[in-house]
Amino acid sequence: AQKVTQAQTEISVVEKEDVTLDCVYETRDTTYYLFWYKQPPSGELVFLIRRNSFDEQNEISGRYSWNFQKSTSSFNFTITASQVVDSAVYFCALTNSGYALNFGRGTSLLVTP
Amino acid sequence: DTAVSQTPKYLVTQMGNDKSIKCEQNLGHDTMYWYKQDSKKFLKIMFSYNNKELIINETVPNRFSPKSPDKAHLNLHINSLELGDSAVYFCASSFGTGQEKLFFGSGTQLSVL
């Protein structure tokens, strides 16, 4: 069975602070894919990143960065110099080569001015 | 041009009624999905279709019947609506299997009174 745990339910930071959203996953598959999605207050789901299990390179995209560590089964997401527009619910998700994404319960991030 | 469009955006109805949600994608994807997001924001797969064929039916009550007339459409019909069906329903699509990123519709907020 696959499982994604996002232990942080809510995080509140002040603008310009750095914040890390944790994601821990469980799977017995050797081939799997990890994702992060953002759900702003408007409600849509926006894709942020996809990683396969054979690629442990960290990734940086502007103020966003991701740290994938198979040794700890973690795929953490860091926002540097947070902004009010980063306020959203962030979901980590996992799949093998199948047809369903298993989502974590999400972390609600509030960035205040 | 909306990539994945679902209608209606809001649906308010009485218990026991039958309702449908329509979904269309213009991305040329061959896999489409229905996800349910409950009041606590938890996202769970309901169905996935590949080339109009049902691939996943994730222990969804028989009252929910998806229909895929072609690759670009995946509609969701719900019979005998119950209070517990109140949720946001997201349609999504992707290339190939679920290992690729999902493009989500904007969601349908269903409220059963």
Image (spheres, coloured by chain):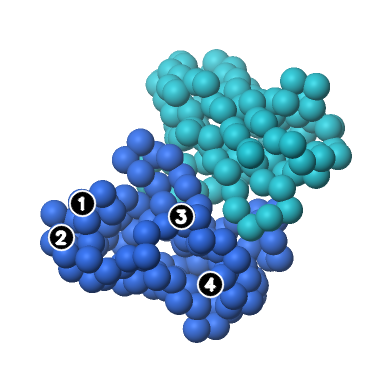
Marks 2, 3: nearer the viewer: 3
Which amino acid type is shown beneath numbered disc 3?
Thr
Rendered location of residue A11, percent (x, y): 46, 19
Marks 1, 4: nearer the viewer: 1
Which amino acid type is shown beneath numbered disc 4?
Gln
Write down the residue under mark 4.
B25
Q: Residue at x 15, y 60 (%)?
A: B15
Rendered location of residue B56, percent (x, y): 56, 61
Write down the residue under mark 3.
B59
Q: Residue at x 63, y 39 (%)?
A: A1
Which amino acid type is shown beneath numbered disc 1?
Leu
Write down the residue under mark 2.
B15
For mark 2, name the chain: B
Q: Element at badge 4?
A: strand
Which tag, 1 or 4, sits closer to the chain's start?
A: 4
* CA–CA distance in space, label 1 to label 4: 29 Å
Q: Element at badge 1?
A: helix
Q: Count the marks: how many?
A: 4
Quadrant in the rendering for residue B107: bottom left
**C-beta proximity under 8 Å, tags 2 and 1:** yes
* CA–CA distance in space, label 1 to label 3: 18 Å
Same chain under badges 1 and 4? The reply is yes
Rendered location of residue A61, percent (x, y): 71, 36
Task: In this rendered view, identify the residue nearer to me: A8 or A45.
Answer: A8
Task: In this rendered view, identify the residue nearer to me: B61 or A101.
Answer: B61
Write down the residue under mark 1.
B83
Which tag, 1 or 3, sits closer to the chain's start?
A: 3
Which tag, 2 or 4, sits closer to the chain's start?
A: 2
Q: Which chain is blue?
A: B
Quadrant in the rendering for residue A17: top right
